[in-house]
Amino acid sequence: MNTTLVGSAPRAQSAADITDWRPEDDAFWNSRGKAIAYRNLWISIPNLLCAFAVWLMWGIITVQMINLGFPFRPDELFTLTAIAGLMGATFRIPASFFIRLAGGRNTVFLTSALLIIPAVWTGVALQDKSTPLWVFQACAFLSGIGGGNFSASMSNINTFFPKRQQGLALGLNAGLGNFGVTTMQIVIPLVMTAGVFGAYGGEAMTLLKDSGWILGKIKAGTPTFIQNAGFVWAAVLVPLVALAWFGMNNLLTISPTYGGTLKAFAKILYLWAIASLVGIVGLYFYLPAPTGLGLLNMWVALPLIIVACVLLMKLGAFGEMKGNINAQFQIFRNKHTWSMTALYIVTFGSFIGFSMALPLSITVIFGFQHIPDAAGVMTHTLKNPNAPSALTYAWIGPFVGALIRPLGGWISDKVGGSIVTQWISAVMVVASAAVGYVMLQAYGSATPEQYFMPFMLLFILLFAASGIGNGSTFRTVGVIFDRLQAGPVLGWTAAVGAYGSFIAPVVIGQQIKAGTPQFAFYGFAAFYAVCLVLNWWFYLRSGAEIKNP
């Protein structure tokens, strides 16, 4: 067994540890580094894909719970997507620092293995309609681990590649990883149609309403194994976790003091325990009764959760962990950390938020005829016989956004990230305002289906623009920051951007309930316009400190 010096004390070195890593050295890269980097990338991608699938599966599960007659109101089901979204983002805050603290291979293995818990528990809970709401909320809470994995995964892949190739590498990892959204939206309706797990999977339930998936409608009365929505990911994760353990590497140039595998695992679990505590308290004060107290609105709860998580991480760190975290916290002194955080909310925040909110939005807006009652008050309770199926169409937008993301990184490597970000921000301003107008028309119509095609085409445009922008903003971070800071910055921006998965379902759900869904998208358009100006000011104007990174 080899040893390497960490400080002044020798430490046993795992076969997965690499002590010499010089990706900017062309000779090293071509002779040895490229093969290792791409092996880690190709193993990282399917693990990240499954992480996204487990995190975002509630957007599809909640739609099918309605079709199967689970005894929950739509606003209660919206809490499941919101909880998963909030915790996915909150778990990203500590995950931003995992690679330096614990090593890449150790982090990907453990964080992927932990996803098996919510996958199995969700499958068990869905076997019985009498399962209480808090159980599903707990499953959604734990599925947020999948959202947290993104920050660690991107930080890890960033360390393997030379700066000139980071746009493409990060675009591939994130873009193909983001296919977890589309994969989930296709696979879950498919595996629900058959008892693929035999007696271990439990009994089928009967659809009370027509459902659907990409091949068309599934008629009411069809036996449905909704529990497979959880079990299928547990089955896929087992071999992927093994692949991560035996095929990935820790770069000791990035995480020289991770201290061995068990110590690395302990650091990850400790920091995630802090994030879990913050999330539980924050959700308790935010969620309405009977789950919580309902004392805080979203715009108060979110910043309090973020600040509390960061402060508790800093105060709770000890030993060598304290020094590492303090060193990485230096990113918060750099103004570009904050500008890139805002820009990443525009791109990834929109992508993930719309992915979470779109299925239920289609179901509510286009699934009912919106007509006035005898008193002239608009009602939204009469079923629309011509309603499009959310499960048939909701996958298209995320598919386009994920597919095009590597292209955004590749173009940005050629022309500069900020130019690409500027163009897509302008497109998103116009497209978001247009979506709001179409939603206004649909929500006031007895035949909302006539507005569905422009609604979907505009949403696909939003997803495409956000996907390209995901690649351009990550490329920009890789250019602005050095190798040690770029990883934590990528993780931090991804963490804050991921709160879009919480904000979008809540904002859209609230505005639909108020009868004004268009206001949600007018607000998004205004935010995109502000960030367009921000991007120009920091990176494109003639006096910019860093020009078109």
Image (cartoon, helix red, strand yellow):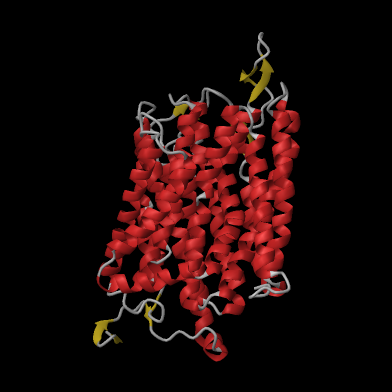
Is 62 on the left or on the right of 283, as rendered? right
Tell me the quadrant of the picture where the C terminus can be found: bottom right
Q: Residue at x 64, y 50 (%)?
A: 527
Vertical comparison of 189 with 490: above or below? above
Q: Is residue 407 visible?
A: no
Q: Is residue 341 visible?
A: yes
Query: In this orientation, which residue lies closer to the viewer: 418 or 85?
Result: 418
What x and y, as percent, mark residue 511?
Answer: 59, 33
Residue found at the very far front of the displayed protein: 543
Query: In this orientation, which residue lies closer to the viewer: 433 or 360?
Result: 433
Vertical comparison of 136 with 309: above or below? above
Tell me the quadrant of the picture where the N terminus can be found: bottom left
Residue found at the very far top of the displayed protein: 374
What x and y, as percent, mark residue 309?
Answer: 37, 55
**Residue 311 sits in quarter:** bottom left
Is 437 on the left or on the right of 166, as rendered? right
Query: In this orientation, which residue lies closer to the viewer: 280 or 335?
Result: 335
What x and y, as percent, mark residue 149?
Answer: 44, 58
Vertical comparison of 258 with 178: above or below? below
Is 130 on the left or on the right of 75, as rendered? left
Query: In this orientation, which residue lies closer to the viewer: 114 or 215?
Result: 114
What x and y, as percent, mark residue 272?
Answer: 33, 56
Q: Residue at x 25, y 72 (%)?
A: 319
